[in-house]
Amino acid sequence: MLRIAVPNKGTLSAPAAQMLRDAGYRQRTDGKDLVCRDEDNAVEFFYLRPRDIATYVGSGDLDLGITGRDLLVDSGVPAREVLDLGFGGATFRWAAPAGSLASAADIGGRRIATAYPGVVERYLDEHDLKADVVRLDGAVENAVRLGVADLIADVVETGTTLRQAGLVTVGEPLLRSSAILIGRHEVTEPRAAQLVRRLQGVLVARSYVMLAYDVRADLLENATALTPGIESPTISPLHREGWVAVQAMVRRVDVHRIMDELYELGARAILVTDIANCRL
Ligand SMILES: Nc1ncnc2c1ncn2[C@@H]1O[C@H](COP(=O)(O)OP(=O)(O)OP(=O)(O)O)[C@@H](O)[C@H]1O
Ligand SMILES: O=P(O)(O)OC[C@H]1O[C@H](OP(=O)(O)OP(=O)(O)O)[C@H](O)[C@@H]1O
Ligand SMILES: [Mg+2]
C-alpha cells in the first residue's frame, strides 16, 4: 500500500480531503478517523497534524503528504515539494504596531513572537540579524499587546486578525505559502506517480473550462487565435454550409472576456462546460 499523510484538522484539512476525493480516492467519512484504507487504489491515508506531516514524510515512514509550504520550511526536514495544490494560499509576514518598525531591517535586537520559529530563524540567519524568538502555539497576534514581544511573524490570509489586534504588516512576506504535496525523493513509484497525475488532472479541471462555439469558416483563424486550446482546438464540420464548430479548453478566469470577443467576431452558440477531470 502507498501511504499518504493528510491534514486531520485546520485550514488545509477539508480542501485536502476534497481534492483527494475529486482525484478518485476514498476518504474518511468520520472526522475523527485516523486512517482510511482505499483498497481499490491500494492507498492508505493517515490523518495527521499538518505540522507533523513533514516529519513523517522526511523520515520515510510515509511516502507522500499534504501540508503547507510554510510548515515544510519551518520543519527543516529534508522533504521536497512535489506539487503545488492550489489551495490554502497565505503569506507569512512580519507585523507590528503601526509606526513601531520602519522596515524589516529594524527587527534586529527585538523580541519576535511566532509559531514558526524555523522560518523566522532561517530569515534571521540569511539576513545576518540577531533577535529573540518567542515560540508560541497560536493566537500570536495577542503577544504584542500582552507585552511578550515587540513584533510577530505569522500567517496572514485576509489580514482581519492583524487589524483586530491593531498590527500592520512590515516589509515583504518572508514567504508565500499554499498547500503542497511533499515527498522524500523524486516520485517514480508507479502508484505515487499515478496519484500525482490524478492531482494534476484535478488542478487542470479546476482552472480550465471547455468552450464550444460555431463560427463562419472564413473567421476561423481569428477565432482560434482567441481559443488556441492547450494543444490545439478541435474543429468539426457543421451541416450549415460555410460554418464550423470549435472546441477548446480555456482558462476559467478568461472565459467571459473570450466569450465577449468571440461574439463580437461573429461566433454564435457559445457554450461553456465544466471539466470534471482530465489527463492531459
Ligand atoms: N487563514 C489561515 N490561517 C491559518 N493557516 C492558514 C490560513 N490559510 C492558509 N493556512 C495554512 O494552513 C497551514 C496551517 O494549518 P494548521 O492546521 O497548522 O493551522 P490552522 O489551520 O490555523 O488550524 P489550528 O490553528 O486550528 O490548528 C499553514 O500551511 C498555513 O499557511
Ligand atoms: O489573515 P486572516 O484571514 O485573519 O488569517 C490569519 C490568521 O488565522 C490563523 O489563526 P487561527 O484562527 O488559526 O488561530 P491560531 O493563531 O490559534 O492558529 C493564523 O494563525 C492567523 O492568526
Ligand atoms: Mg491556526
Image (cartoon, rainbow, N blue to C red):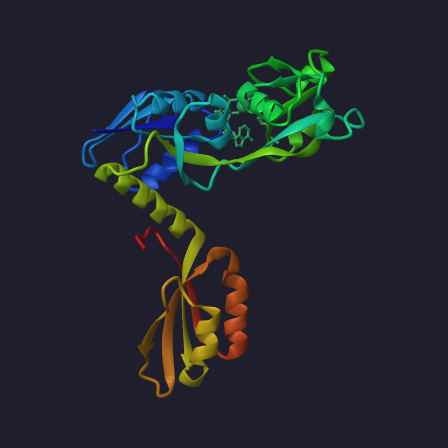
Q: Residue at x 64, y 27 (%)?
A: 127
On screen, residue 91 versus residue 151, left or right, reads left
- Quadrant occupied by the N terminus: top left
> x and y percent of residue 78 in the render?
40, 26
On screen, residue 111 versus residue 37, left or right, reads right
- Quadrant occupied by the C terminus: bottom left
> x and y percent of residue 123 in the render?
60, 26
Taking depth in this image into account, of 100 and 222 the one nearest to the observer is 100
Q: Residue at x 58, y 14 (%)?
A: 136
Which picture quadrant has residue 182? top left
> x and y percent of residue 45 in the render?
29, 27
Residue 16 seen in this snapshot: yes
Taking depth in this image into account, of 207 and 125 the one nearest to the observer is 125
> x and y percent of residue 84 in the render?
43, 40
Q: Residue at x 36, y 46 (%)?
A: 200
Q: Residue at x 51, y 56 (%)?
A: 253
User: Which image quadrant shows ligand 2?
Assistant: top right
Residue 168 seen in this snapshot: no
Q: Residue furthest bottom?
A: 241
